[in-house]
Image (cartoon, helix red, strand yellow):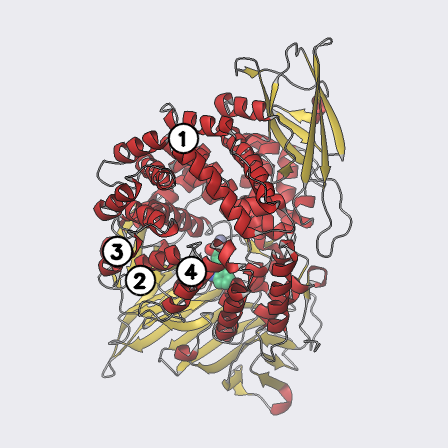
């Protein structure tokens, strides 16, 4: 096997930069294939840098046209320039001015990093290391610079010119057909937050007055004709601005805040200072083309990027190992925002579902890494569920441990102390340690140890003495690069339910091992003793999912049913239903694997019926409870020797038993729910969620009119949520009405790319045997486009991550299909290819035949002569 040398970057090798760049004046003359960039840098030695220390600026695929130092050309012995570096071999002792001219080709840039064009609009993406594709620079987050950007373009081609900060000047260049704008950003920032946009865009304007009375002009820029789809994003932005003032006392700090929606984007959105650039799917929304989920995502992503202005921009990261410092914290903040805008319990359930279905598998496989990694070969591959979602859980645990007041004090101190800094996780934690007087040393292991801890539970009730002793035991399996693990500090929120379901007021004898209703599990094994417990109580553990751990199920089915009916913690009511269903599904799965007929447990079916009919419960919450654990959740629970078709079948058996038992109620509810005309409110969305769920169960019931009902819903829907829910049921249950409904959807939405993405996804996630042939044909559909990441993810990504039984087909065709796609996309867009290939990450858990096929495909990709560092990094870690 050939070995491919790749540089590994290590946390322990961090050194401060030897040089600072105080200001940069950029002059960018835009042209589709030949854009001229002149950068004037004011550079000085950092304190303590010895005289004569060479200076190396980063570059990526750059061509140097001209270089001057303090107005003079440099001799050949004084510098060296390659596409990836510009070195000054003898830099002056005193501060100096470096003028660098480069020429770049936006149209040839298919990676979507650096300067590129999306539907004709010039835009940039500089995180993590894209700025070096524009000009030579110290492209590292701890070099903070004040930027002035002059943009010049053909007026015909780009009537709107946007940059970071405030607009200083703009106008027409006489007699040229060209115009220009000068933007100045007074806040020193790292290069990854630089952005510019130029194009013929329409603008939706609004304004916001901050708490201290500053007026901020808000603008959302979109393709002309899409102005009507910006109202929800604008509303979300204003609510985010108010929320951050009220919740954290954080105000916006520039005169303008602009958002631009582009259709070609590798990720969700980007928090460039004063000029956020968005994947258009997280800006555009109207009832006709966006689902309730889309509305919720737009709200969350707008908030997320806005919140980065403080947690990310004003305080940035010292190095990329600290990525979770901004991402984990900002995800936590956007989750809290959405919880305040919507139902807190439902939001928590949705977040935990995402965590368990994406982050837990990552942490259990070959791609596992700590929230703060120690080494990387390609930083783009570390924008992961672990850094984002588990990173947010760690901040949430900090809040749980410290309580509301001290948490806020810690945040205030962090902002006050580190405003303008490029900070570290240690500095962040120090603020919370200081305000609370706590030692957070053990807690900080959450940033360093990868893998999901397991917590075993053992409760012994002694009726004679009236005591209950609860023993919790934690363990953490070895993960890549980490053989031995330390016990963590795990906050376990708890409650006990009495005979009538009421909360018992119990606290452990070991008072220092608890804080309020939170047990502090810090040793490998710990026993908590509760007095005054005469009757056997029912335990409610890990309320609100107070820590990202796997709790070893210890409850009897009767206790779980009791919790489902009575627990005052809504999260644990949901969790009880999930646990009951998981156990039942695993039993059915085991039966299928052994060719034994197994009947579905009626107690579970009855309990689900009770929840369905319990109108005291919020419809959104009922929908979450009735939504069975997904195939990925079951795969995670089973853990090894997986046969994905049996998982699919087990799920279908249980769904069908529930559907048949309560067919009348499902039919009635499907008619009664969500009849008001569309508003995106959480309450209305909840009704539509429950309605969609009812249709799904109805479809697998034995009612004769089930096809007719679902078909009618697909036809009569007056919003995307309802239409897509019905279409999904028709297609995934292979109902007779499916082809017509697909055709009618296509007629209706053929011209709208984001709506067509849903049409691609429905077919990509169809568990039928014919799916792969269909998907292959869809890659040739006129609405499909290999160069657009949203299209590729909607069809290919949805297949490989959302259609487990077909992706892992026993004939290997699913794996081979993904391999072909990855090889096709790898040179064009390495980030996208690397993300797609990550779908292989759980291959070792498959039964031997499928695992062997996956390994063979991965090995073949790894053997490719030309492969991006992005894809190679993922593939080699998967095989390691
Ligand atoms: N910082 C962005 C966010 O959290 C993430 C991001 C957007 C990104 N585009 C990227 C990361 C490109 C890497 C590459 O919202
Ligand atoms: Zn972010």
Name the residue carrying label 3: 740
Q: Nearer the viewer, residue 517 or 616?
A: 616
| Residue 444 horizontal side relative to residue 176, left or right | right
Label 2, label 3: how many angstroms apart (C-alpha)?
20 Å
| Distance from the alpha carbon under mark 4 to that under mark 1 | 30 Å
Residue 640 image offset from top left, x and y in percent: 65, 50
- Residue 393 vs residue 647, the one in the foreground: 647
* Mark before the other along the chain sequence, 3 or 4: 3
**Residue that badge 4 annotates:** 771
- Nearer mark to the viewer, of 2 and 3: 3
Residue 164 vs 302, above or below: the answer is below
Find disc 1 in the rendering and name its residue: 661
Q: Quadrant of residue 194?
A: bottom left
Cβ atoms at labels 3 and 1 below 8 Å apart? no
Q: Closest to the observer: 577 or 753?
A: 577
Q: Earlier in the sequence, mark 2 or mark 1?
A: 1
Q: Residues within 10 Å of mark 2 (few under 14, many from 20)?
A: some
Q: Secondary structure at mark 2?
A: helix
Which class describes the residues within 10 Å of circle 4: few (<14), some (14-19), or many (20+)? some
Residues at badges 2 and 4 in contact (C-beta under 8 Å)?
no
Residue drawn at x 52%, y 30% as measured from the top left: 601
Mark earlier in primary sequence (2, 3): 3
Instruction: Give the crowd class for mark 3: few <14, some 14-19, many >=20 residues within 10 Å.
Output: some
Name the residue: 39% across, 29% down.
Answer: 612
Q: Of circles 2 and 4, which is in front?
A: 4
Mark linked to residue 753: 2
Quadrant in the picture for the C terminus: bottom right
Label 2 close to label 1 by CB (< 8 Å): no
């Amino acid at each position: 096997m050939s070995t491919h040398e790749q540089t590994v970057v290590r946390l322990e090798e961090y050194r401060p930069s030897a040089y600072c760049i105080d200001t940069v004046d950029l002059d960018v003359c835009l042209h589709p294939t030949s854009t001229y960039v002149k950068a004037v840098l004011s550079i000085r030695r950092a304190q303590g840098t010895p005289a004569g220390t060479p200076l190396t600026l980063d570059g990526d695929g750059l061509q140097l046209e001209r270089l001057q130092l303090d107005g003079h050309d440099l001799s050949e012995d004084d510098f060296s320039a390659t596409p990836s570096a510009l070195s000054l071999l003898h830099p002056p002792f005193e501060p100096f001015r470096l003028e660098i001219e480069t020429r770049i080709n936006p149209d040839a840039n298919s990676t979507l990093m650096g300067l590129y064009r999306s539907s004709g609009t010039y835009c940039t993406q500089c995180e993590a290391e894209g700025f070096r594709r524009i000009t030579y620079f110290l492209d590292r987050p701890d070099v903070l610079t004040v930027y002035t950007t002059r943009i010049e373009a053909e007026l015909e081609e780009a009537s709107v010119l946007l940059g970071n900060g405030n607009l200083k000047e703009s106008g027409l260049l006489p007699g040229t057909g060209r115009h220009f704008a000068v933007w100045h950003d007074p806040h020193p920032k790292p290069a990854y937050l630089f952005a510019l946009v130029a194009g013929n865009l329409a603008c939706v304007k609004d304004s916001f007055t901050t708490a201290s009375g500053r007026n901020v002009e808000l603008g959302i820029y979109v393709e002309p004709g899409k102005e009507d789809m910006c109202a929800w994003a604008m509303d979300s932005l204003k609510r985010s601005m108010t929320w951050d003032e009220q919740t954290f006392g954080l105000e916006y700090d520039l005169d303008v805040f602009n958002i631009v929606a582009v259709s070609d984007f590798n990720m969700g959105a980007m928090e460039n200072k004063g000029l956020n650039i968005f994947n258009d799917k997280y800006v555009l929304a109207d009832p006709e083309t966006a689902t309730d989920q889309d509305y919720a995502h737009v709200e969350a992503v707008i908030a997320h990027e806005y919140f980065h202005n403080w947690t990310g921009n004003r305080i940035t990261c010292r190095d990329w190992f600290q990525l979770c410092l901004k991402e984990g914290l900002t995800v936590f903040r956007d989750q809290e925002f959405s919880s305040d805008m919507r139902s807190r319990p439902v939001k928590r359930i949705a977040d935990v579902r995402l965590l368990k279905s994406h982050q837990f598998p990552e942490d259990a496989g070959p791609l596992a890494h700590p929230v703060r990694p120690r080494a990387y070969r390609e930083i783009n591959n570390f924008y992961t569920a672990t850094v984002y979602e588990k990173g947010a859980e760690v901040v949430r645990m900090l809040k749980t441990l410290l309580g509301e007041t001290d948490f806020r004090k810690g945040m205030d101190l962090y902002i006050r102390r580190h405003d303008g800094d490029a900070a570290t996780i240690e500095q962040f934690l120090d603020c919370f340690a200081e305000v609370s007087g706590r030692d957070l040393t053990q807690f900080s292991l959450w940033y360093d140890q990868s893998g999901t801890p397991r917590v075993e539970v053992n409760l012994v009730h002694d009726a004679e003495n009236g005591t209950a002793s609860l023993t919790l035991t934690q363990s953490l399996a070895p993960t890549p690069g980490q053989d031995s693990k330390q016990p963590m500090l795990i906050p376990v929120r708890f409650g006990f339910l009495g005979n009538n379901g009421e909360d018992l007021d119990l606290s452990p004898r070991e008072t220092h091992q608890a804080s309020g209703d939170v047990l502090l599990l810090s040793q490998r094994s710990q026993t908590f003793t509760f007095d005054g417990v005469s009757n056997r109580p029912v335990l409610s553990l890990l309320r609100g999912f107070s820590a990202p751990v796997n709790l070893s199920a210890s409850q009897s089915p009767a206790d779980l049913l009791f919790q489902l009916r009575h627990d005052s913690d809504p999260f644990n009511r949901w969790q009880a239903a999930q646990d009951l269903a998981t156990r039942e599904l695993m039993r059915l799965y085991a039966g299928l694997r052994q060719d034994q007929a197994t009947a579905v447990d009626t107690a579970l079916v009855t309990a689900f019926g009770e929840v369905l009919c319990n109108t005291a419960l919020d419809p959104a919450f009922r929908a979450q409870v009735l939504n069975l654990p997904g195939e990925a959740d079951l795969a995670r629970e089973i853990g090894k020797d997986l046969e994905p078709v049996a998982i699919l079948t087990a799920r279908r058996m249980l769904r069908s038993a529930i559907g048949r038992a309560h067919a009348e109620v499902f039919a009635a509810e499907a008619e009664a729910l969500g009849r008001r005309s569309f508003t995106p409110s959480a309450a209305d969305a909840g009704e539509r969620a429950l309605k969609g769920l009812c249709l799904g169960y109805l479809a697998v019931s034995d009612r004769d009119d089930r096809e007719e009902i679902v078909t009618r819903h697909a036809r009569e829907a007056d919003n995307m949520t309802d239409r897509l829910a019905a279409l999904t049921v028709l297609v995934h249950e292979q109902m007779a009405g499916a082809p017509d409904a697909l055709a009618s959807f296509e007629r209706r939405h053929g011209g709208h790319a984001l709506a067509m993405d849903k049409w691609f996804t429905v077919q990509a996630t169809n568990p039928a045997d014919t799916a792969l042939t269909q998907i292959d044909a869809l890659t040739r559909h006129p609405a499909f486009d290999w160069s657009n990441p949203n299209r590729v993810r909607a069809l290919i990504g949805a297949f490989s991550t959302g259609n487990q039984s077909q992706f892992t087909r026993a004939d290997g065709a699913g794996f081979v299909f993904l391999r072909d796609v990855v090889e096709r996309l790898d040179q064009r867009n390495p980030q996208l290819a690397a993300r797609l290939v990550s779908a292989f990450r759980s291959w070792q858990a498959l039964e031997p035949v499928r695992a062997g096929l996956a390994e063979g495909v991965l090995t073949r990709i790894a053997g490719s002569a030309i492969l991006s560092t992005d894809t190679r990094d993922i593939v080699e870690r998967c095989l390691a």
